[in-house]
Every structure is written in structure tokens, then in C-alpha cells.
Image (cartoon, grey):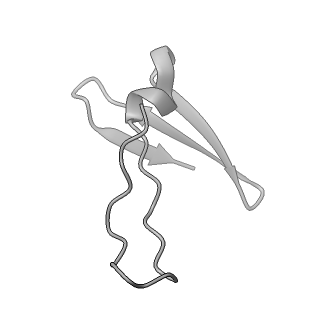
Amino acid sequence: MQLADKGARRGDASATAPREVDSSELLGSSGQLVIHHEQRRYVLRRTKSGKLILNA
């Protein structure tokens, strides 16, 4: 489920709102997402208490 974009200023064509995505869409049933960034591997995961942790 993609949420509506927020934050763009009216009348300012150069302002771009950040993309918003529901965490369950990213993490799926495994509760984890692997992100490759600048030749490093990061893992975004949901904890048992429902928080998000990003580890390199």
C-alpha cells in the first residue's frame, strides 16, 4: 500500500515529496529487507516489539 505524497510546497515545482511506503510492504512476511548501498549490505528488520532496526 503506497501512501499519498506529503510535504511538497505549493507552487514550488522544484520541491519533491519523499516517497512513502508501508513497512509491511517492504519487509514482507519475513520481517526483513536487504539493502545494497555503495557496495555495502544493510539489513532492515522488524523487532519483536515492532520497532525497526538497520544493521550493516
Give the residue at the far front of this rendering.
11
Between 4 and 52, which is closer to the camera in this rendering? 4
Please provide percent x and percent y for residue 14.
52, 83
Up the image or down, 25 lies above or below 16; here it is above
Query: Which quarter of the image is occupied by the N terminus?
Result: top left
Give the residue at the far left of this rendering.
49
**Is 46 displayed left or right of 25 in the figure?**
left
Please provide percent x and percent y for residue 18.
45, 62
Between 32 and 5, which is closer to the camera in this rendering? 5
Numbered marks: total: 0
Up the image or down, 12 lies above or below 24; here it is below
Please provide percent x and percent y for residue 11.
38, 83
Q: Residue 3 sits in which quadrant? A: top left
Q: Give the residue displayed 46% in from the left and 47% down from the top.
A: 54
Up the image or down, 5 lies above or below 8; here it is above
**Is 3 displayed left or right of 51 in the figure?**
right
Give the residue at the far right of this rendering.
39
Between 21 and 48, which is closer to the camera in this rendering? 21
Q: Give the residue displayed 42% in from the left and 85% down from the top.
A: 12
Q: Give the residue displayed 62% in from the left and 37% down from the top.
A: 34
Q: Give the residue displayed 34% in from the left and 78% down from the top.
A: 9
Between 55 and 23, which is closer to the camera in this rendering? 23
**Is 40 displayed left or right of 42 in the figure?**
right
